Image (tube, rainbow, N blue to C red):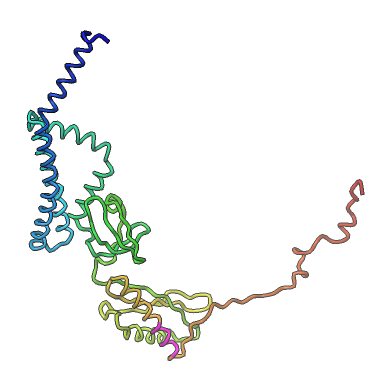
Amino acid sequence: MNPSNPLIQEIQASLLGLVGEGIRLLPSILMALTILAITSYAAKAVRQVVAVAADRALQNRSLRSLAVQISYVSAWVVGIVTSCVVAFPGLGLGDIIGLLGLGSVAIGFAFQDIFKNFLAGILLLLQQPFRIGDQIVINSYEGTVEEIKIRATRIRTYDGEIVVMPNSLLFTNPVQVRTALPHRRTDLAISVDYNTPLPTAIETLLSALKNVKDVLEEPAPEIDVVSFGDSAVDLMARFWTTPQQVVVRRTSTQVMIALKQACDRANIVIPYPIRTVYHFDQTKYEDFMPRERSQIAAEPPLKGR
C-alpha cells in the first residue's frame, strides 16, 4: 500500500488528531473521574447529614425518607454535571441544558416505567395515603409497609415474606389501609337453636363479648339477628379492636371461646345443620318405569335377528 496515497494520509492525520485530542483531554477526563469518585462519597455524606437533620425537623417518617432520597439524587446530579463541565471545557451551560432536554426525551421513552414509578413514589410520600408501619391490602398482597422508596415500596406479609411493589401500582390501584383509623370492626357469625329465646341469647352473647379483654368498650359491641337459617337462627357478633392484624386475630379466637362457653353455661344450643331426607319407592311412579311389556312385544322384530 502506497503511504503517499491521499486517503491514507488523511486517515493517518485524523488518527493523530484524535490521539492528540485524547492526550490533551486526558487530564480533564481524569479530573472528571476523580470528581465522580468524590461524588459517591459526598452523596453518602449528604444523605447522612440530611437524615440527621430530617429526624430533628420532621416527625413524619415518609417525609424524612423523601428528603433523604431527594438529597442523595441531587448530589449525584450536581456531581455528574460538574464532571461533564470539567471533562469538556468547551461545553457551556446552554449546551448542557440542551443536552439534558434532548436526553430527557430519549430517556423518558426508554425508561418511562422507571420515571412513572419515580413520580408515583414522590406523590405517595407527599400525599401519604399510607405511612411506614401501616398494614395495607393491595391486590392479593396484605402486610406491613416497611419502606417507601422513590421507585418501589417494600411490604412484609403476615407470612414473613417480602413483597417489592412498584409505586405506580400502589398509586393507580385501590389500596385498603387497615390501620388508618384507631378502631377496626370484626364480624363473627354464630347460630342458635330455634327453641332458644332470642332476647336471652342476645343478652348472653353480648355479656360474653364485653368480658373479652381486647374488645373495646367504645364503640360498643353488638349482637344482631341477621336471618332465619335452614336449621338455626343466624346471629352476628360485631366487636371493635385496635386495627393491628395480630390483635384482631387473637381477639377473634378469644371471642369464639367466650361465646361458646357462654352458650354452654346458658344451655343455648348451637345446632348442627339438619336435613330431612325422604325415601320413595320409585317403582310406583311411571316416570321411572320402562315401557310396558305389551308395547315392547308389539314392536316388529328387527331384520337380521
Image-based side of 263 in relation to 162, left or right: right
Q: Nearer the viewer, residue 230 or 255?
A: 255
Q: Is residue 196 above or below residue 124?
A: below
Q: Residue at x 8, y 61 (%)?
A: 57
Place residue 27 in its image quadrant: top left
Image-based side of 71 in relation to 289, left or right: left
Give the magenta-colored segment's residue range.
Answer: 257-264
Q: Residue at x 10, y 49 (%)?
A: 42
| SS assignment for the magenta stretch, majority | helix
Where does the image place residue 73, in percent across and percent down from the top left? 15, 47
Is 22 magenta? The answer is: no
Q: Is residue 80 above or below residue 238?
A: above
Q: Is residue 95 above or below residue 272?
A: above
Image-based side of 128 in relation to 35, left or right: right
Give the quadrant of the N terminus: top left
Where does the image place residue 246, in percent across and percent down from the top left? 32, 73
Image-based side of 48 in relation to 253, left or right: left
Is 261 magenta? The answer is: yes
Place residue 15 in its image quadrant: top left
Q: Residue at x 26, y 40 (%)?
A: 111
Where does the image place residue 204, in percent across and percent down from the top left? 38, 87
Where does the image place residue 125, in percent across and percent down from the top left? 19, 55
Q: Count the marks: how many?
A: 0
Q: Nearer the viewer, residue 303 or 247?
A: 247
Q: Nearer the viewer, residue 170 or 144?
A: 144
